[in-house]
Image: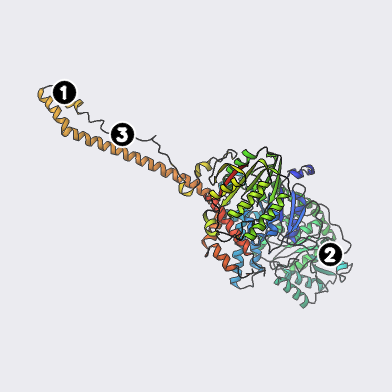
Amino acid sequence: MEIKNDESSKKSQSRISIISYDIIGKNMAGPGIRFYEFAKILSEYLDVTLLTPNKIDIDTEGFKTRQYKINNYKTLQKNVENSDIILIQGHILYYFPFLRNFRGKIIVDLYNPFNLESLEMFRDNDMIERIRIDKNNINILKLQLTIGDFFICASEKQRDYWIGMLSAVGRLNPYNYDSDSTLRKLIDVVPFGIPSEPPARSSLSLRDVIPEIKEEDMVVLWGGGIWNWLDPITAIKAIWEITRSRKNIKMVFMGVKHPDPKLPEMKKCVEAINLAKELDLYGANIFFNEWTPYDLRRTFLLDSDVGLSIHSERIETEFSYRTRVIDYIWSRLPIITTEGDSIARMVKNENIGEVVKYGNTHQLSRVIESILTNKSLREIYSKNLNKIAPGFYWENVTKPLVKYCIGPYYAFDKRKIIELIDLQNSKISRIIKNNFEGCASVLKITSKKYRDEKIIDKKDVGKLFYLEVDDDFTAPGNEGANMDEVGILKSRITERAKFDGIIANNAFFNITPKFFHDITNVLSSKLKKDGLLFFSIPEKRGLHALLGEGIKKNKTSDRIDDFTIEFILKNAGFKIIEKGISDKLEYSSKYNGINEFNDIYGKNELFELFEIKLDRDDFEDLQLLSRLDILDSEELTGDKTVKGKLRRYMYLLTSMYFENLRKSYNESIKAVNNNIQVQINREINELNRKNRERLLLIYFNIFKTLYEEIKSLGYDVSSLRGILGDFKPKNESGLVIDIDQKLEVLLRDFENIDKVLGFTVSNKYYLARKA
């Protein structure tokens, strides 16, 4: 795939928010480095914003950066709502569950199977805590796998694992299979990469940082952190064996203290330090660096003679992808690694180092000594490393990611749900475009700019201005606050010139008569003569309305009715052109190939789901009384005598009449029964067909997850808010749980279910012209 760097077209490309769960800066680990390099590569093609939990203190030329706070979800929400794509990884959904409702495309980086790492990381915890952590990890993974549009992982081996997981949550379905039977459009491989420029030394050398290492010493590098699933113990014992005969072999651990304070202390790290001290190697032959800065790591790599990646025999090993080994490839450092993972197979196949058995101290010590004492062998490994290095350049390994970001798409199964929800808004969009198209200047007041962008485009009007109000900008319960909020809005509007049209689409919730009176007069003052006003008032229905009562701040029962709305509009000098309720699904021709939505949903109400018309095509004709012409019967017409004539008239009134009547009745009833059965069978078949189609859409896996959340809910949301409002619960990391975010996400989940089931927001709308 050839991807051109066309800087001139950059402005027209999509906007992507890369949300890093890891620290990014001078001190960072593998996941942070990965997202930092992604931002650099993607900034050549897209408008990139890198969001991190810390303030970035390294070069960020070419892309924007923003800092978010773990305990304040709105610091992230404001930055991502205008994005077309988000890229997430790890536990970010645990801290920011609102991201599950992001309406753009979602890329999930599955580079790190953290559920497997956690099994070893928390092995010494009590079983109840371990089960809780594992269940939480699995829930996060299932949510990621359910909502993602495109997935990336580090290796083909990992891809096999994640395809199994995707299959388990229902993502390997006919929609995704028919779009691409290889599933590369759903999940592809993007390994860890290296810069195309070779590493350059910094002003400091390894020996400047650790003076105990002399010029003649040879250095064995442990190029990363010491995690519980690795095996530093075998490595330290191997160095001890070597030092019994050679004193010029030194080993350096690049980092023992992760820069992210959220991570717990590793037990294996403590054991490694204690063992080095017991063997009198600590500070003499083995050195533990606290954490090596991103730029200084190049010097550590260049000043070393061989790189180690030693791990234990565990399930984590099989699906891991050791970042440190990729750094060894960058610096052309011979590699010694333990068997069992995809990296070990690469080392063996490409002849770029040696592979040792699990936990074999003697073999490891012999291999280290052999490589360090054989310069020609190291040169062979270095030559082979030169051959394979270009395949790991970031610009090469990220090609599947870049390709997706240049032409992003919803996953094909998820697209059906998105199209269905978009159809719900088609009526409002047509009303606005039909009336406002061609206006010289239009003001759009909205609480969700990204959501309302599709209602009317800039190309439809001369100039389009936005005024974004906060999500909590609702009509308050006390009049003082009401005046404050309307006053703030008035001051923001009066700064502008007058408009030909104003659109307020779902911008204000829980509107009271006084609030509507005040806001209508403010808007009227900024409209030119004959200017248009579109005002929609959302009313919640379904689960969202049932369980969401009381959750919104400043909730009031003083709701506005239709008569009051019309009275206020007329008093403010408006003539109502059109009014209505937009809560029905209507088919729009722009959705080619999805006529089935209109067929399936009809009026889009669950209790009016199916209207099956009577079809007479297969009915039998009724022959009632068609055989009761007694006078024309053969028995009577053949007898010409007087007696026969008498018999003819007698039978007209007696047995033949009733016998033929009985036969006619029986045949007619049979035909009626047949016709009824035909219609019943037809209706059953039609109901089954429509049910299958409907369930195929509704049984999208995110809604399975949401159903479990609802089923386990012991209180309605308003009661839950009242209970939790008096204290500040904390999670296992010691962070205060943001109850408002949790409840907002839960309400959004209810709203999503309502949309799919047809119980959507019922929007009363009014289109009025200023007299």
**Could you classify mark 3 by the number of other residues whose Cα lies within 10 Å: few (under 14), some (14-19), or many (20 or more)?**
some
The foreground one among 21 and 366 is 21
Instruction: Check the picture and name the quadrant holding the N terminus.
Output: top right
Q: Tell me if 156 is positioned left or right of 416 in this view.
A: right
Of badges 1 and 2, the one in the foreground is: 1
Q: Which is more N-terminal, label 2 or label 1? A: 2
Disc 3/disc 1 C-alpha distance (Å): 29 Å
Residue 331 drawn at (x, y percent): 82, 58
Tag of residue 638: 1
Q: Amino acid at mark 2?
A: Thr
Hey, which quadrant is residue 406 in on the image?
top right
**Could you classify mark 1 by the number of other residues whose Cα lies within 10 Å: few (under 14), some (14-19), or many (20 or more)?**
few
Instruction: Name the residue furthest front.
Output: 571
The foreground one among 271 and 241 is 271
Instruction: Name the residue furthest left.
Output: 643
Dot 1: element: loop
Hey, which quadrant is residue 161 in on the image?
bottom right
The foreground one among 423 and 370 is 423
Dot 3: element: loop
Disc 2/disc 3 C-alpha distance (Å): 104 Å
CB atoms of marks 2 and 3 within 8 Å: no
